[in-house]
Image (cartoon, rainbow, N blue to C red):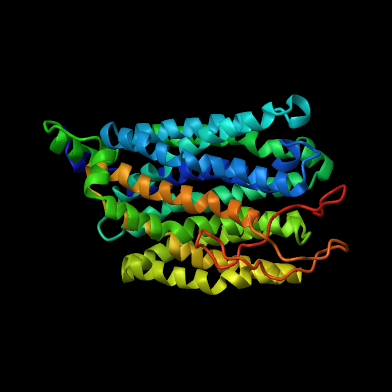
Amino acid sequence: MPTQPATRQSPYRAAFAALAGTSIEWYDFYAFATAAAIVFDDVFFPPDMSPYLKTLSAFATFAVGFLLRPLGGIVFGHIGDRVGRKKTLVITLVMMGVASFAIGLLPTYSQVGALAPVLLIALRLIQGIAIGGEWGGAVLIAVENAPPGKAAFFGSFAQLGSSVGALLSTGAFSLMNLFGNDAFMSWGWRVPFLASSVLVIVGLVVRVKLEESPVMSEVRDEHAAAEQKLPVVEVFQKAWRTVLIGVFALATATGGYYVVTSFLLSYGTGDLRLSESMLLNGLTLAAFLELLVTPWLSWLADRVGPHKVVIAGLAGVIVLAIPQFMVLGTGSVILIWLMMLAMRLVMSALYGPIASILAEGFAPHVRYTGISLSYQICNMVFGGLAPLLAVSSPRPRAATTGPRRSCSWPSRPSASGARPGSGACGCRSRGTARPR
């Protein structure tokens, strides 16, 4: 069996491979989140359904994918801990790409009736399983190839996939918005999903050339002769406390992110009648900022300690949570964008270094399963339900006439714990076309 030095590859090459794959995975995932907020209620549900129920149903399709993410973490975590990180990451990338491309080809409710949302949910479940196995493997490829003392920095490259994917996704939807409302609702929303096939091919080329993580050589040497328990069994027997710590440590980073992206779009365009293109452009700017600051904040985490940077990010999220939604009521593009940028800055401090913290919490031979379960259980509980609960919560009364509703900040705290104020429902009250 080759020794670790023989199989070690450049940490930058490994980090880029992690970034390339997670960028594509998250592009596909955020495309679904964006479409659920601004498209799916009209395309996949009955026209005579109330706007509130349609929006709730659209977010339910978004949430259902989270239900199978822990299953994906268990299945692909097992493969990653026993067979190898590389092969697992190739499988998850293909699954995600095929499901996303198929969503772009789905018939609408007006064409096939109730079969349309059924097919959408089925593909969403496939996405959930694939994402369940993606993040853990990408983090380990980067962290396990990192030089000593630089795990947070190189681990952050896997985290950057979130901002790159969000940047590409919101950018694609913003571009499609330029063709006008009719074109966007007819075919424009499909283009981001179909375009993912090109990105998947690029990602596969990068990952197929990737070498296996050096830690896998040690795992095979140490555990080849020993009778081993299933990774998921060993994790819950010996490291269940670490799993719970990971779940709650990630709660704000994951649940909060989906609330300030997916639900923010629905609340802003529906209740406040803000321009979709303005909000999408703001999210694009925020994703670009995240792309720039996450490596620097993670580098800082290697110097001062990742826990200190994460705690500082959490404090920032708490401070900005209510103002994030209060400024939406002003209608000021500058204020809304500045608050989006500020929120993404503090969330980057929370999200960037967390990968290295979790990777260090589990033994190498169950590490893939352990960090995947922590991350995906957290996403199932706090990520998928956060925007759904926000949409279903009571909202303050507001006038329904005029170019924009006057509205106070949402009054009921989110059950996700991600921010204290996600109470307005995202039901849309449109006219014949949406403001853009």
Please report the residue visible at 72 percent of the width from the left and 66 percent of the height from the top.
396
**Outermost residue, front side:** 394
Residue 384 is situated, as x and y percent measured from the top left of the image, at: 53, 48
**Outermost residue, left side:** 225
Please report the residue visible at 46 percent of the width from the left and 36 percent of the height from the top.
129
Q: Is residue 14 visible?
A: no
Looking at the rendered image, the quarter that the C terminus falls into is: bottom right
Residue 376 is situated, as x and y percent measured from the top left of the image, at: 42, 46
Q: Which of 367/56 is in front?
A: 56
| Residue 277, picture quadrant | bottom right
Looking at the rendered image, the quarter that the N terminus falls into is: top left
Left-right relation of 101 to 375 = right
Q: Which of 2/86 is in front?
A: 86
Residue 308 is situated, as x and y percent measured from the top left of the image, at: 36, 71
Please report the residue visible at 66 percent of the width from the left and 33 percent of the height from the top.
117
Please report the residue visible at 73 percent of the width from the left and 31 percent of the height from the top.
108
**Outermost residue, bottom side:** 319
Left-right relation of 153 to 360 = right
Q: Is residue 229 visible?
A: yes
Q: Is residue 196 above or below residue 160?
A: above
Q: Which of 294/50 is in front?
A: 50
Q: Is residue 381 above or below residue 48?
A: below
Left-right relation of 12 to 395 = left
Q: Is residue 9 above or below residue 382?
A: above
| Residue 151, picture quadrant | bottom left
Q: Is residue 251 above or below residue 86?
A: below
Residue 80 is situated, as x and y percent measured from the top left of the image, at: 32, 36
Count of numbered circles in the view: 0
